[in-house]
Image (tube, rainbow, N blue to C red):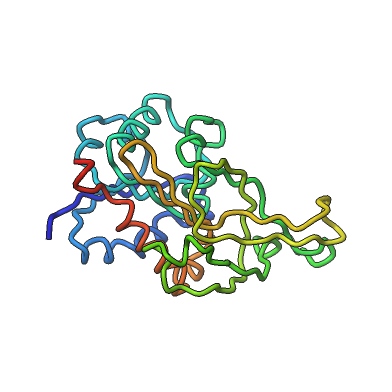
Amino acid sequence: MTRKNALVVRGGWEGHQPVRATELFLPFLRENGYAVRIEESTEVYADADAMAGTDLVVQCVTMSQIEAEQLTGLRAAVVAGTGFTGWHGGIADSFRASSDYLHLVGGQFATHPGKEPCERQGGQEDNYLPHTVDITELGREHPITAGIEDFELHTEQYWVLHDDLIDVLATTTHPTQPWHPWHRPVTCPAVWTRRWGAGRVVVTTPGHSLDVLEHPAVRTIIERGMLWATRTASAS
């Protein structure tokens, strides 16, 4: 087995438990032959030598900010073949002020609709809704999601703004409700891939809490996404 180098970058909003969340996946990476480096900030992205030797970046940094030279380094690494993946706000709600980051990942968290106002009690659970993640036709054939059936979750349901350069492996649909301002159901990507230069990007939007990350379908998608995104021989 050829040894691969994985870089786990974590931080940002503590509500997504970036340390505990990423720790869930370290055994999988090591069991699959990755040497794992962990960084608690995005400063490493500006280190060209470190990034050139990285085959996969697993990012869990919700919101926060990124310096221009760090983002330039990340984008250059992906273009050169470094894989880039993550879940939920750690990748789809990172660096809100950076349009260039959005351009890299192809989709951005906009909101997560909540319960009926009279049922809300002021906690995170106000935004937990039962919903379905539907595997697309492409997803049924893709190595990340092949063999996974549509599945139900009760957690945050991401509403994502996105472009057309993503390959959508799974979707989720937001229904209309009397207390919502939209007038028809809205289907958003829930899992997607993106080719960027020689690199591969994988975004999985479920993953708000540890129990969601441990859901068999969610965990399988994230783990397969890590393998698929990893630098290929042709990108070396």
Q: Which of these two is toward me, 34 or 145?
A: 145
- In the rendered picture of this protein, how many numbered marks are placed on residues? 0
The quadrant the C terminus occupies is top left
The quadrant the N terminus occupies is bottom left
Q: Which of these two is toward me, 29 or 106?
A: 106
Give coordinates of residue 96: x percent, y percent.
56, 36
Give coordinates of residue 99: x percent, y percent.
53, 30
Asked if 164 appears above or below 135 in the picture, the reply is above
Quadrant hosting residue 235: top left
In the image as oriented, which residue stretches furthest toward the top?
Answer: 68
User: Going 24% across and 46% down the picture, which residue do you hit?
Assistant: 55
Determine whether, in the image, residue 179 is placed left or right of residue 172.
right
Asked if 7 appears above or below 118 in the picture, the reply is above
Q: Which of these two is toward me, 56 or 210?
A: 56
Asked if 47 appears above or below 201 in the picture, the reply is above
Determine whether, in the image, residue 116 is placed left or right of residue 107.
right
Give coordinates of residue 176: x percent, y percent.
80, 60
User: Going 43% across and 27% down the picture, which residue do you hit?
Assistant: 67
Quadrant hosting residue 234: top left
User: Going 66% across and 56% down the picture, which residue do you hit?
Assistant: 187
Determine whether, in the image, residue 140 is placed left or right of residue 83.
right
Asked if 82 appears above or below 30 in the picture, the reply is above
Give coordinates of residue 44: x percent, y percent.
30, 36
User: Going 37% across and 58% down the picture, which residue do you hit?
Assistant: 225
